[in-house]
Image (cartoon, rainbow, N blue to C red):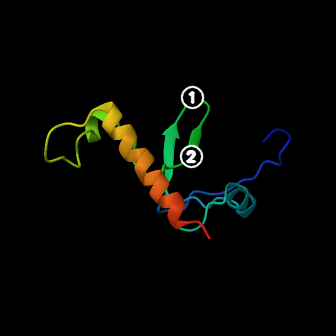
Amino acid sequence: MAGATKLTTTVSTKGQVILPKPIRQRRRWKPGTRLVVEDTKEGVLLKQAPLLAPTRAKDVFGCLGHAGPPKSLEQMQAGIAQEARRRHARNRY
């Protein structure tokens, strides 16, 4: 935001801060937008919170479960190809 006009706001008695409308519009922050507040050496940094919490593969791996013997890589690739063919055939005019 180089060369941008500096805007000011006030902290209310409840600790609330109103972000100036031009900033909210530029960031597309609508009412209810969740923000992450970070205290830095330079001041306070506000960033939009991610819609979903970050996850790691090991945290969710196997969460759907599977009954039966494990599938080989070849079997998985064949299943994906079969479903792609089915969907393609369904979408033909």
Give, as a three-letter code, the residue at label 1.
Answer: Lys
Q: Report the residue that reaches farthest toward the top.
A: 41
Please say if the residues under marks 1 and 2 sit with CB atoms less than 8 Å apart.
Answer: no
User: Of 33 and 38, which appears nearest the observer?
Assistant: 33
Image quadrant occupied by the N terminus: top right
Residue at position x 63%, y 57% from top? Answer: 10
Q: Report the residue that reaches farthest toward the right.
A: 3
Per the image, label 2 sits on a secondary structure element best described as: strand
Residue 82 image position (x, y, % from top left): 41, 50
Query: Where is mark 1, residue-wise?
Result: 41
3 lies above or below 27 = above
Per the image, label 1 sits on a secondary structure element best described as: loop
User: Of 72 and 30, which appears nearest the observer?
Assistant: 72
Residue 65 image position (x, y, % from top left): 19, 47
The image quarter containing residue 23 is bottom right
Is 93 left, or right, of 53 in this rendering? right
Evaluate whether residue 32 shows in this view.
no
Circle 1 packing at 10 Å, graded few (<14), some (14-19), many (20+), is few
Is 1 left, or right, of 75 in this rendering? right
Q: Report the residue that reaches farthest toward the left.
A: 68
Residue 31 image position (x, y, % from top left): 56, 68
31 lies above or below 28 = below
Query: Where is mark 2, residue-wise?
Result: 47
Residue 87 image position (x, y, % from top left): 48, 60
The image quarter containing residue 11 is bottom right
Residue at position x 13%, y 44% from top? Answer: 68
